[in-house]
Amino acid sequence: MGLLDKLFGKQAPQHEEEITMEKMNIGIVLGSTREGRLSPQVGNWVKELADKRGDANYTIIDIADYKLPLLGENGGDASGAAGWSEAVAAQDGFVFVVQEYNHSISASLKNALDYLRDEWGNKAAGIVSYGSVGGARAAEHLRGILGELQVADVRVHPALSLFTDFENGAELKAAPVQADSVNQMLDQVIPWATALKTIRK
Ligand SMILES: Cc1cc2nc3c(=O)[nH]c(=O)nc-3n(C[C@H](O)[C@H](O)[C@H](O)COP(=O)(O)O)c2cc1C
């Protein structure tokens, strides 16, 4: 039992039927696009853990696949934007794989978020971040942005250290507690995604 559960008393688990009536579509969004990035390793690790739960349809969504130019860029080839819109619209919730760039999120993730509006709204999200201090500063910036987009981000936040959860800062070797944290985060994302679906048109 976690510290907060001990302090405030554990919430009664929701009835399984309530949360598995319809499987939610949850997109695992890779936030970085640079060559040599670590985000596919982190995204695949999250997906592996998530798929074991069998409680939702989990899909990796790689921003790099859509080759989005900067929003509104003169002469930019925005032909990937329609596919990006479709991919996001098809989800009921998200796990953002967030890496810290200069104490914030990557420019590619911010640009990809800015591209869409209605496709994000009234959906739930969890954040898995990484960086020298677990990507915490980037994750907190993302929470502010998600508020504006009306994405409900859950409290539990797995934060991977580049020093202790990666070997040589390059190969993901997450401490066991991090897998528990991913599951606790998804325990919050799935019911919120289910609830928010009822208010979307
Ligand atoms: C431009 C840039 C800025 C960075 N700034 C920070 C930072 O402020 N804090 C931090 O903890 N790590 C920082 N890092 C390290 C990244 O978090 C680390 O390289 C991480 O692997 C980047 O994610 P990616 O591999 O998926 O691109 C920075 C990396 C880059 C490329």
Image (spheres, grey):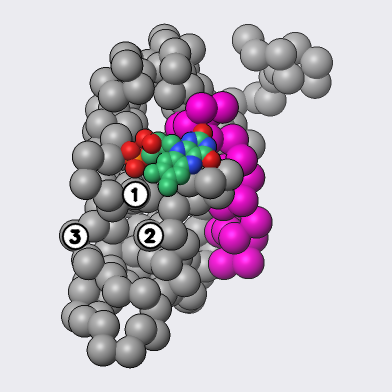
- Describe the element under mark 3 as helix, strand or loop: helix
Residue 32: which disc? 1
Asked if residue 92 is positioned above or below residue 166 in the image, the reply reads below
Q: Is mark 1 within 8 Å of ligand 1?
A: yes
Q: Are marks 1 and 2 in contact (CB under 8 Å)?
A: yes
Residue 65: which disc? 3
Name the residue tied to disc 2. 108
Mark 1 belongs to which amino acid?
Ser
Q: Earlier in the sequence, mark 3 or mark 2?
A: 3
Q: CA distance from mark 1 to mark 3?
A: 11 Å
Where is ligand 1, by quadrant? top left
Classed neighbour count for the residue bearing mark 2: other residues with Cα under 10 Å, few (<14), some (14–19), many (≥20)? many
- Describe the element under mark 2 as helix, strand or loop: helix
Magenta range is 129-152
**Residue for point 42% across, 67% down:** 111
Can residue 137 be found in the magenta stretch? yes
Q: What is the quadrant of residue 157 in the picture?
A: top right
Can residue 99 be found in the magenta stretch? no
Mark 3 belongs to which amino acid?
Asp
